Every structure is written in C-alpha cells, then in structure tokens.
Amino acid sequence: MENNNLNNLPKELFKPLVRKEDTSETISKPSRTFGQEARRTLLKNKPAIISLILLIIIIIMSIVGPHMSEYGNDDQNLSRAKLPPHAPGLEKISWLGFDGTLTDDFKGSTVEEAKSKAIARFDNQEKFIDFKVKSKGNGERNSAEVEATYHVYDAKGMGDQYFWLGTDHLGRDQWTRLWLGTRVSLIIAFVAAILDLLIGVTYGGISGFFGGKVDNYMQRVIEVLVGIPNLVIILLMMLFMQPGIMSIVIALAITGWTGMARIVRGEVMKVKNQEFVLAARTLGTSNGSIIRKHLLPNISGIIIVNTMFSIPSAVFFEAFLSFIGLGIVPPNASLGSLINIGFQNLRIYPHLLVYPAILISLIMITFNILGDGLRDAFDPKMHK
Amino acid sequence: MSKLLEVKDLSVSFNTYNGEVQAVRGVSFDLNEGETLAIVGESGSGKSVTSSTLMGLLPKPAGIIKSGQILFQGEDLVKKSEKEMQKIRGKEISMVFQDPLSSLNPTMKIGNQIIEGLIKHQGMNRAEAKKKAIELLDQVGIPHPEIRVNQYPHQFSGGMRQRVVIAIALACNPKILIADEPTTALDVTIQAQILELMKEIQRNTKTSIIFITHDLGVVANVADRVAVMYAGKIVEIGTVDDVFYNPKHPYTWGLLGSMPTLDADDEELYTIPGTPPDMLNPPKGDAFAPRNEFALEIDAVMEPPMFKVSDTHYAATWLLHKNAPKIEMPESVRRRIEGFAKTGKKGGE
Amino acid sequence: MARYILRRLGYMIVTLFIIATLSFFLMKMLPGSPLNAEDKLSEEQKAIVLEKYGLNDPVPVQYVRYLTGLVQGDLGISFKFDNTPVTQILLDRIGPSALVGFQAMVIGTILGIALGLIAAVFHNGFLDYTSTIIAVLGTSIPSFVFAGLLQYVFAVELGWFPVALWGEPEHTILPTIALAITPLATAARFIRTEMVEVLGSNYMLTAKAKGIGQAGRVWKHGFRNALIPLITVIGPMAVNIMTGSMVIEQIFAIPGIGEQFVSSVLVNDYPTIMGTTLLYAFAFIVIILIVDLLYGLIDPRIRVTGGNK
C-alpha cells in the first residue's frame, strides 16, 4: 500500500461528506414515448428509408407521369407501332437504350444472307440499318453472324419525335401507359389492403375478444376458407364478375383478410389476458373503453405491419389476373396487363416487358423492406 | 494450500451503442486449491462478467479485456487463443449457469450432452463415455440413472436439471468449478439440496469452487472466503468469519443488515437507499459514495485503495485510513452479527 | 396420438364436404353449360346434350349424384373436352406439375437452408447482407417477372434453353429455377432468423463452456434446433408452389394442372374447374396434416411427453 501518499492526504478530506443533491437515483436515459422510439428506430433503418422515398416517388409519378407526355392512354396509331424507347438527352448515350434504335443479331450461311435477313425484318429500310459483322462465316448454315442496328425513328421520318419508353404494338405511348398502369395497380392494392384491414380486424377482434363459442365457430369458418389456396378462390370469383377494377378489389378483399384476422385474434387474446386489462376492468372500465384505450394501441403496430405486407400480395395477384386476361384487360392499363403484352413481344421488343417488370418489382421490394423496417420499429426489443 | 488462480487487476468493458460500459474495474483475487470463494454483489456489480471473463466467454465483439492478468496454474488466460481456451473449458475449468432449463439443449438427450465433453476432452469412446455418464448422474443424486441418461431435459424437474448441469460440468474432473447463481432459479428446498450436493462434491474431489450469488445466506452456507463486489470493484474480501463477524465496509454492513432472518427483532430492516450507478459514466471517486451514509469528503474525490485489516481480510474504504473518524457499524447490524455468533448460524439456514 | 389423427381426418372430410357443396352450388348459379363448346345445334340436339349431362334433373338429385360420384373419385365430365372425365384430365396433368413442383421444393429448400446458415453464422457481415438481399428479392419479385427474366436471358439471348417447351429433362430446368426462388427465399430468411436466435441461446453458451469448438456448436447444437421449426413453414411453401405453378406453367407452356385450371376458367368449363379446386383443397389439407404430424414426431419435446417427474 502506498502509505506515503496516503499519509499526505489533507485532514479536511476526512470529514463527513456534505451532500448537495441526491444523485443516486437519477435516470440516465431520456424518457421517450413508444411512438417516438418507434420513429427513431425506423429512421435509423437506411434501407427502409430509401424504400419509403422510392415509394413516394413512384406514387407521385403515377399521379403526375401520364400528364408529362402529350399522349393519352388510348392514342393508337399503327404507323408508329412497336417503336423502341427514344428519349431526349439520353439518346446520346448509345448503350442505355434510349436512342430510338432496334438491335438484333442475324445469322446466315454468308454475311450477305445474314444481312438480307436483317433488312427483311427491319422494314426493308437498308439505308437506315448499320451493320457490324460478328463472324464472316464459311458457307455453313448459320456460321455468319451480323449485328444490325435499325434507326427506326429516322426511317419513319420521326427523328424529332420522342416516345420516352417506346410504343406498343398498337402505337400507344408506353410512358403514359406505364404510369397509368401503376396508378391502377396501386389503387387496387391499397383499396384491397384497407378492406382486408377493416374486415380482418373486425373479425379477428370479435373472435379474440369474446372467445369461447363465438371464437370457435368463427375460427372454423376461417379454416375452411384457408383450406383453398387464395388464387383458386380469386379465379373462381372472377368467374362471377366482369373483369374490372371493382371486381378485382372485391376478389382480393375476400381472400386477403384471413391472415389479418388470425393475427389480430392472437394479439387480442394475448393482450386480453394481460394484467393491465384485468386492472382496468377491476377499476370499472367499460368494454368499449378497454378496446379503445388498451387493446388498440398495443395492436396497432402489428396491424400496420400486416397491412404493409398485404399490399405487395395484392399487387401480385392483380398482376397475375391481368396477366392471364382475367383482370384488367386491354385497352385499360395495369402493370399486369402491360406485362402480358410485354411477354407476347419478349423476343423482339423486350422494352415492353422490361419497364413494367422493373416497376412492379420495385414496388414489391420497397413495400417488403418498408414492412420489415416497420416491424422492427414496433418491436420494443429492437429499440436502441 | 497452493494458489490455483490469481486474478490481477482485471478490467473488462463493453462497447455498446451508447458508449463504453466499464463492467469490471481493476479486480484482484486469488483462489486456492480445494476452497470455495463466494463473490457477492447486486445485479450489475460485475460478478457475472468476472466469471465469464475467467473462461473467455465474453460476448464478442462487444466485450473486451482492457487490462489485467488471469494466472491459472502459472499461465495467463488472457493471452490464450480461442483454440487453447477450448482445451481448458470443460476440462480444467467448468461452469454452471443460472437457469438449468435454458442451459440444456432441448432436443438432445441428457446422456449425449454429458458424453460430448467426455469424448472431446478425455478421448473416451461412446461406450465408456456412456458408462461414465451414468456414474456421474448417480453421483449427483439422480435416481435410475441408466434410464434417465436417455431422456430429454423437459422430462426432468428443475432441481434434477441443475444436478444434470452439475454432472456435465464435473464430467472431466475440472480443477475449478464456476457456479454463476446456480440456485437463484430454484425453490428454497431444492436450493438447499443443490448446495449440499456441491459441498459433498468438493469434499470428494477437492475441486475449487467460485460461487457467484447475491444471497448472503447461501454464502454463509458454502463458502470459505467471500469477496464483496460493487460497481465493478471488490470492496471487501476475507474469510467468511472475517466478513460476517467483522465487516469493515459500509456496503457490507448494508448487505448483512438487510438480510431478513427469523431471529431478527421487531426493528426495521436496514436498507441501502438508491440504486447502483450507471457504469457508462462511473462516478468520480468512490462509486458507493452516493448511497453511503458514512461517506467522507474524500470519497467524492478519490477511490479508496484496499486497506489491510488482517492477513486474510482487506477492505476498500476510507474509513480505515488513520485520519478517518472512528465510525462503528450501525447498531442493527451489530445486533444481527451477535445473533449469528450466538446461534452459530450465519442466517439463511 | 391416434385420436388426434382421427380428429384431424374428421376435420378434413368436413372441410372437403363443405368445399364440394359450395363448388356445386356455385356451378349451378353460373351461366354456362356444355353447350358453350358447341354452336349451331338444333333444339333437339341441345336437349340431348343436356340430358346426357343430367342437367335436366332437379337440383337435389344432381347434388346427390355429384356427391356420390365424388366419393367414388368421379369428378364429372368436362364441358370442354367431350366425354372426357375430369378425373382423367387431372390425372394426365398431374405428372408435369408434380415433377416441377417437387424439384423446385427440394432444390429451393436445400439451397435456402444453406443460404440461411451462411447468413446466420456470418451474422451482420457481408455474406449475411448479401443473402438477406437475395432473400428479399426472392420474396418480392413476382414469379412471372423472374420467369420472364430467365426466359429472356437464357432462352432468347443466350439460347441455352428453349423458351417454352416440354418433353425433355432439360426443359424442366428453367421452370424449376423460377419456381424454386420463393421456397429458397422463405427458407433462407427463416433459417437465418432461427439460427441467430439459437446461436444466442443459453445452451449454446453451455456448449462453449464445455470447450466445444465453433463447428461443433453450429452443427450439433445449433443447426438441428433451427431446422425443426422449418417444418412449420413447409405448409405455406407448398401452397406457394401450387399457386406459383399456375403462373409458371402459363409462361413455360407446361401441360400441368395449373395451366389446365387457368384455361378451364377462361372457357367456363365448370366441372373441370370445380374438380381442380377440390384437388387443390385436398392436396393442401393433406400436406398440412402431414406437416403437423411430422412436427410432432421430430421435436422430442412433443414426441416424448411426461416421463418420470
């Protein structure tokens, strides 16, 4: 022991400590409400925030996009059918694909034969076709290969006209249709999701809250419904109804609520049995108040997360329905019907498929990531 | 008795989201062969972190050993690699955890969980290991061990499970057994059985035990020596007699005084106000000062060093400085201690 | 245990009965009959056709006939394909669907488990990040988009596979990949979550305290415990495959049940539609039952109850 140092300590230090304030019980973390904690956790989640921003952009574009071009949804003009994308500014960057040209590879036994195939396909406009010989060939079948680039806009004398995402087989502007389609798909998905929410929460809430026989019967009904895959039920529903926005929404709503109902029921039962509800009841709170003030705040997190996840599911089903011709049918546009057209033209005009496919994928990815982020945000264990 | 373990000035911190939490700040103690050392303290005092560190079980990457040595049979465990530690864990030093249900793999037969260590460390084959496992279950007092060895953890009661955990820990005859609050999750009657079991094992095998607990009654029952921890430091250390009959640190007074016992008189229970400090920002000076009614001015300025009370007994309090006023332990605590001496019991039995 | 199985079977029969009844009355309410397929028949010929299908009998009679037929495995006659029993149509088509579906399930699950394992062991590292991205993409990108992508890249551009053909083993590759993405992503996410939880559990710490190395801990203690709950996800995965096959078969022109279902919906061939619906419901319920039973067999906590206390 360092006795020297200890011996040199001034004597005044050995008087009893005079306390200024009791610092022993201060709480060091700032206190925040659950909502604030949830928001903080969400804001820290970079992928979720990026997804949110992307989604907002997409939604805005779906409202504004169609107005940005001078073409309407149904402006058909066969003379300008099947044009590739042509965008001002971006046309300078040849590899991006916005320069208004069609490119493909053609094979033949000789270079001449390959070239003539290309010319035949591209409207016999030899003047507007650039050739790049990829392989000289030796007389055998398909040994010569030529890459032909067709400046179709120039060939049609439309060098100064721009269709940002090209046109489809009927000459309709894809940019307009893309955003109109997005609008339709999003509306259907949102409305269906909200209906799911309303039906599911009510059904699950009643089932869980009252329990006993009521719950039993209600659960049996769900079990029967769940016994058939959703898509089957949706297709059956579409048999009944004319294809259109309303019918799709109804079909989606009828099948989508079961998930929400089950989860809500589970949560209600869990919360119902917790002690703070018992306490409230002992104090004489009415059922209605208990539901409003105690159950709902605890459940709202899960409800929001579930709704968030049911939207991409609705988008998918709508797209599939339209894809097989049972949903939104042409000339109306939805992402599914656009993809349908895109598939039919996949080989030669991939741009008709690419953009709606990218958009639908983006929508679903962002909703999923955002849903994940919200789920983490509402989970107290994930709060930092 | 020779020194099996020497811990010198160990400091451990955790890098958390909010900053560095100093869990253990300069802890030193020894462990001798065949003895039981109890480490007592509140939640957050650093006792569990200390024991985890001894076995190299600190969660990475958050936990780091900032300084100090852990000399086991002359070698510093702090410097050992993970692979080297794997040879020591389960074989030289074993651990028993608090909750027996979650400490056991729920989908693995009990026998296999014991056999695993035997095969790895003792090089036995399955048949030998299974025989040994049955023996071990018998030694820890599990009836029908030959049937039990093929069962799953959920088929055992809480006390039985803890016996199994002890069997696993002792399988390879370790020199040190670290028991981290092994009885806290159990009923009081089972608690007594487990403590008896551990004492018997020590008698038979001469294993040294480090017993971590917050219950002084348990300490009185099993320990030879006691170390009292507060806010990451050892504040008093000595034999059980030293600490129970002649405590010198106000915190120890508080601990002794706040044990409810049957032969307490009708006076109030002595309590220590407040809560342990936040180790994110350890207070300046003595960490116990804010709750210490006997604090001196110097406690707010400088941490007290360890003062020697006897060859076996040390305490870190400025009250032992020659310039400090002569302060005696509170009356209620003194009477409590006299009660121990009279009945020969140290409470909790 | 036996009682439990019997009870579940009972539920199954009740559910199927309800679905069959609903299907029957749905069919009755919808406009459409075998006459859709034929035009230009005289009144007498139309009457003969209706008689042949028993559509002139009172509804209750038709209902009973329908049910008795069901029990014997007779699902009626297709409106579209004259004289072909629905059962026949379905049997012909089960092969391709089962093949692709099974392949997709197996490959997707195995790869998904591997991916999830890697992600969990390298928790929060680069590999974890990558496999999480793959999992998110897998569950988000619609299957037909992905199928289209596969078609474009591998069939149109690279020419390795035909765009949509059926007959040779290699024709199953692209559809299997497209269908396998969802089970892969689901399994990966699930295993990752389970493994992370298991790796942080107390018994994992015990294993480390016994001196078991990382490999031993991850495999013997971690993986087995994470794998067991995976069975609960297989049910939904199977449904997904069934649903997904409708999409995939369309795109790759596979003569399977999904493609049949879609085309019968488009031509209002009700017997076939109802028959297929029943088949789906049956398959789904059976899978759920098997999965539940399997879980009880594999998890020792459920299999071995009680014991000596």
Image (tube, coloured by chain):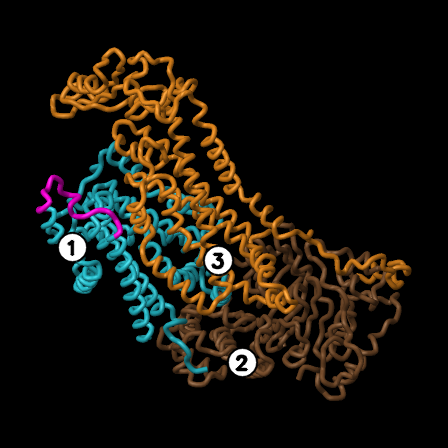
User: Crowding at label 3, few (<14), some or many (≥20) Cα neighbours within 10 Å?
Assistant: many
> Disc 2 designates what residue?
B205
Residue type at the position of mark 3 = Val
Mark 3–mark 2 distance (CA, rounded to whole Å): 57 Å
* Quadrant into which the N terminus of chain A falls: bottom right
- Residue C56 is tagged as 1
Residue A264: mark in rendering: 3
Q: Residue C285 location in percent, x, y?
A: 30, 61
Inspect the image, locate mark 2, and give the three-letter code of the amino acid beneath it: Thr
Q: Are marks 2 and 1 in contact (CB under 8 Å)?
A: no
User: Looking at the picture, does residue C81 appear above or below residue C23?
Assistant: above
Q: Which colour is chain C painted?
A: cyan
Q: Residue at x 68, y 74 (%)?
A: B226
Residue B106 is marked as none
Q: Image point 64% across, 67% down: which residue? A: A284
Using the rendered image of the protein, determine whether residue C282 is visible from the camera's viewpoint. Answer: no
Q: Marks 3/1: CA distance?
A: 47 Å
Q: Is residue B35 magenta?
A: no
Which of the chains bears the disc numbered 1?
Answer: C
Q: Where does the magenta region start and end?
A: C29-45
Within 10 Å of disc 1 (Cα), the crowding (few <14, some 14-19, many 20+) is some
Look at the picture and state if B242 lies above or below B50. Answer: below
Chain coloured orange in this rendering: A
Q: Is residue C41 magenta?
A: yes
Q: Nearer the viewer, mark 3 or mark 1?
A: 1
Residue type for callout 1: Asn
- Please state the horizontal and vertical placement of residue C281, each as a whole percent of the image: 28, 58
Q: Single out the mark in the foreground, 3 or 2.
A: 3
* Chain letter for the brown colouring in the rendering: B
Measuring from the top left, give residue B297's x and y in whole percent.
Answer: 86, 60
Assign a secondary structure to mark 2: helix
Identified at 27% across, 44% down, the residue is C248
